[in-house]
Image (cartoon, rainbow, N blue to C red):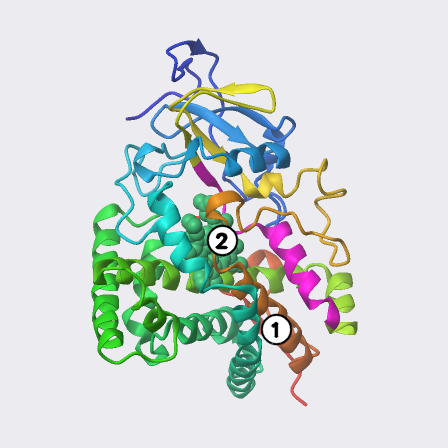
Amino acid sequence: MSYDPTAAATTADGTTTDAPPTLPTDRRTGCPFDPPAGLTALSDTPMRRLRYADGHVGRLVTGHAAARAVLADPRFSSRYELLHLPVSMAGMSGELPPAPVGDIIGLDAPEHSRYRRLLTGRFTVRRMRRLTERAEQLTSECLDAMEQAGPTVDLVEAFARPVPALMICELLGVPYAERDRFQSQVAILFDQTVGEGPKGEAYTALLQYLEELVLAKRAEPTDDLLSDLTSADLTDEELAGIGGLLLAAGLDTTMNMLGLGVFALFSNPDQLDALRADPGLAGQTAEELLRYLSVADPLLRSALEDVEVEGELIRAGETVTVSVQAANRDPRRFPDPDRLDIHRRATGHLAFGHGAHQCLGQQLARVEMAVALPALFARFPTLRLAVPPREVPLRDRANIYGVVSLPVTWDKE
Ligand code: HEM
């Protein structure tokens, strides 16, 4: 359905209002690490009306406290089929299909809680910390290969993509050598310019690959998460679906945090110097980059009943767009929020979400970032951008924000 953004709009309860704004997404002007200028302009109040791609009128939440309140409240549903999209994706603006089997992000309790319980026991802080040693080895191998290929490389292909890919493959027990069978499909799933048809084909191919793998693990379990999950009360279809979600989430998110994170550090040389001088700041740096960049944005919810948030009534049926990037720049929560400051205590940011759906892979992502960033800068003390910053291509039409490529260079000894 096409619409006139200047026209008056009809809300869920049938009343007519002045035309609310649509979600600003244009980052072409301004700093590539900041939220779109139009979004910052709408962040003067924690919550306001928002017009969606199909004309629906719901909410935009930009305040940190309001965002936490919405994400923690079970009266807000995550079910895809209840959501309206704030911007049109590949021409799609109407109803979304329900979550495919195993995609727990699009489920509510009690279905969601059942899967979540099975998974959380397997994603403990302790287990993820044990992966630190493995992350160090894999990072070091990637840096060896990068050194051989240099002194000018695309950091995304040489480093930001392989490190998390190797880690998630290792954790799940997916052979990295078979990455051609799943990497391109995952890229299609996260690309907003790709229509539903090709997305469906990519998802089917990914699931087919994982179903074969699940059968192999059932027949001959190995020491990994997928094998471990074969002992849980899950069908092959459920297991393949969960495997697909973990693989997709594990490949794309941390890759973008590493690529965009290095670009942000290059653009803030005082912060990069501080990290180089004290690699012990790596954990804090990862946390602050997560806050500052907020690559997984926005998060959508639908009100199942009338709910009051921060004194405002959200009507049943309204879709709420929680802008993580705006909430993580809320000056009431983070003083001087537009400054990248690796010495600040950035904990409490919402980059991994909040509430029932808070990211299951967050400890893994933290380990990957805290290991990979200092190792990269220690191996290449003269590492720098190989192109002017404005020539770095940005992933502004993808579900997860980042850089398409990051040409870097260094002085050979
Ligand atoms: C820096 C990297 C990452 C970021 C920024 C990130 C961000 C997020 C966010 C914001 C959510 C909440 C979605 C919502 O509430 O609607 C989420 C959920 C999730 N993430 Fe991550 N993620 C990252 C890495 C990972 C990794 C490495 C894995 C896999 C091992 C993973 C697996 C998941 C899963 C399974 C969920 C769904 C949890 C649920 O619905 O209960 N994530 N992530």
Q: Work out how far the residue at label 2 is from the one at label 1, CA to CA, in angstroms.
A: 19 Å
| Residue 33 appears left or right of 190 | right
Mark 2 CB near ligand 1 (8 Å cut): yes
Q: Position of residue 304 (x, y in %)?
A: 39, 27
Front position in the image: 186 or 408: 186
Is label 2 in a helix, a strand or a loop? Answer: loop
* Quadrant housing residue 86: top left
* Residue highlighted by disc 1: 371
Q: Is residue 74 magenta?
A: no
Task: Name the mark on residue 165.
Answer: none
Binning the other alpha carbons within 10 Å of mark 1 as few (below 14), some (14 to 19) or many (20 upward) gives many
The residue type indicated by label 2 comes to Cys
Q: Position of residue 219 (x, y in %)?
A: 22, 78
Observer-side mark, 2 or 1, equals 2
Q: Is residue 283 magenta?
A: yes
Q: Which region shows up in magenta?
A: 280-300
Is any part of residue 253 visible from this angle? no
Is any part of residue 333 visible from this angle? yes
* Quadrant housing residue 203: bottom left
For the C terminus, the image quarter is: bottom right
* Residue highlighted by disc 2: 359
The residue under the point 37% across, 30% down is 53
The residue type indicated by label 1 comes to Val
Is label 1 in a helix, a strand or a loop? Answer: helix
